[in-house]
Image: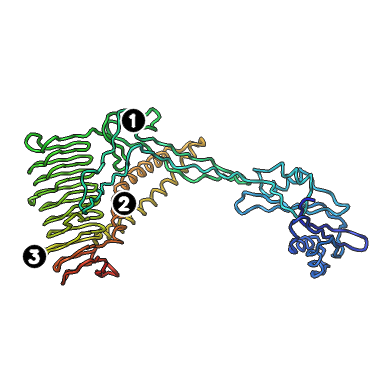
Amino acid sequence: MEQMNAYFCLDVQEFGTAIRIFPPKEGGERLDIREVTTYLERHGCDAYNLKELNLAISGDEESSVPVGDIHPNFINEEMEITISPNNMEAVCRFYPATENGSKINVQEILKSLTAKGVIAGVDQDEILKFMEERRYCTDYIMAKGIPPVEGHDARIEYYFNTDVNLRPKKNEDGSVNYHQLNVISHVELGQLIAKLFPEDRGKPGKTIRGGELKPAAVKSLQLAYGDHIKISEDKTELYSDVTGHAMLVNGKVFVSDVYEVPADVDNSTGDIDYSGNVVIKGNVKGGFTVRAKGNVIVDGVVEDAVIEAEGQIIVKRGIHGMTKGLLKAKGNILCKFIENALVISGGSIETDCILHSKVYASYEIRVSGKKGFITGGVIRAGNLVEAQTIGSSMGAITRIEVGVEPQKKARYVKLQKEIAEAEKTLEQIGTILTTYRGKMKNGERLSNEKLAYVTQLTRAQLEKEKELAPVKEEYEVLHNEMTQERSARVKVTRTVYAGTIITISDASMTLKTDRSFCQIVKNEGELEIQNM
């Protein structure tokens, strides 16, 4: 015996009408009293005893309950259609005819579905299934919508190391190992270095009432690259045109040979300005300049010279700046020691010691070598300054600053508003252009005035997007800094001396006494010294 829901039918006799209740079989669903009473009242059978009807429905045996007379004295087979709220399903329930009533046919089912607005996704097999088995008080899904097929964003795979992390290994004695850094991602001539996997836009779906269901929007990408790179005909693969190294800078792939200076940068070389990485085996003498689009590695000492890099800077034996030396990198800086120099990093800085210098990093400054001291000068980082010793018992003025400056916060809020307003304007322009372009696509001819208006809107859209690009770029930079401010702190693993000036964002304090093994954080607008 197979499963079957409970159902009912009317039994019309000369002396009156009764409802016959057929219990469920093999775990089928019981009747809902509301469904039964709604059906009876729809047909004028309101002379029933509700308690008696409930008992019959809850029983396990076939039973009959008087419900009054009906006129006319027959009822045809009926179908009730329910459309799901999302218009993706039409569910039908059937009710049997009385003995002398007629049964519903396929054409009547289709006609009823059409009357309900169902014009797509009708399941002929489900209709035939009902016609064959005729089960009542049972859901038949007679129509199903077609859900959209979701696509996916485009993505790019890079076949070289794009996560260049210059944090060095520590030796057993606590000193920093500057020899094993492995910062260059080498590539060979003809090597595949990047591959674009285009976006899949998916397929639209359709509701049973004919409405279109669009898949979610996806992002497209393009390969961006510099010199010494070949791109495949289908614009999806990049190959190195030289044997050298690859870098990823702001989403753009660069490949370059390495320029190596075998000895010092001095009168024999002149200033160096190179599009890739620069490796200097000797020293950088005073007065000379080294600029690189990639990383700069100096095996020796930097004197009162200038080194600027769009990547990282490594100075294995430190900088004697003599107040004129400058190290400036968009990435991290590793330097054995920093003395009387200006050092600026767009990432983090790690060194053994800092003496009478101005040292600025967007994220962290760690002075964690064998000596690990900061004495004199101004040290500024977005998130963390960490050292063994800060300040001096001899009274050298040392300023430590972390966090985001108040004026940057104000700028951040202003940029947020500018971006929101610009995107709202672009959305409005886009809606209008989509409407007009749709009309033209459908063959409608626009007047000269409307065509001029479309041209004007398109130009305005391009100009607004061009204006918005640098604003978004600045906003992202500030957003990163704001994120860093939440955990901004100064950490001392040995001693911070009295007289040291600590500033976190807009709060400042001058230490009155020496403190050891502590960190300074900002808590509810005030600076707080916490023991570790």
Place residue 353 in its image quadrant: bottom left
Mark 1 — residue? 191
Q: Which mark is residue 377?
A: none
State which quarter of the image contains the C terminus. bottom left
- Out of 372 and 113, give the one closest to the viewer: 372
Q: Earlier along the polypeptide chain: callout 2 or callout 3?
A: 3
Q: Residue furthest right?
A: 14
Measured in 3D between alpha carbons, the distance from the residue under mark 2 to the one under mark 1, in whole angstroms, is: 33 Å
- Out of 450 and 238, give the one closest to the viewer: 238
Measured in 3D between alpha carbons, the distance from the residue under mark 2 to the one under mark 3, in whole angstroms, is: 42 Å
Above or below for 369 versus 453: below
Mark 2 — residue? 476
Q: Which amino acid does label 2 sit on?
A: Glu
Above or below for 367 versus 250: below
Residue at the spot x=19%, y=69% of the render?
515
- Out of 371 and 120, give the one closest to the viewer: 371
Mark 3 — residue? 394
Q: Give the x, y percent position of residue 90.
A: 67, 50
Q: Which amino acid does label 1 sit on?
A: Gln
For residue 430, side relative to residue 62 (left or right)? left
- Helix, strand or loop for disc 2: helix
For residue 319, side relative to residue 223 (left or right)? left
Q: Give the x, y percent position of residue 400.
A: 18, 61
Place residue 6 in its image quadrant: bottom right
Q: Are the residues at dot 2 and dot 3 in contact (C-beta closer than 8 Å)? A: no
Label 1 neighbourhood size at 10 Å, few (<14), some (14-19), many (20+)?
Answer: some
Measured in 3D between alpha carbons, the distance from the residue under mark 1 to the one under mark 3, in whole angstroms, is: 58 Å
Q: Give the x, y percent position of residue 164.
A: 29, 44
Q: Which amino acid does label 3 sit on?
A: Met
Q: Give the x, y percent position of residue 442.
A: 52, 37
Label 2 neighbourhood size at 10 Å, few (<14), some (14-19), many (20+)?
Answer: some
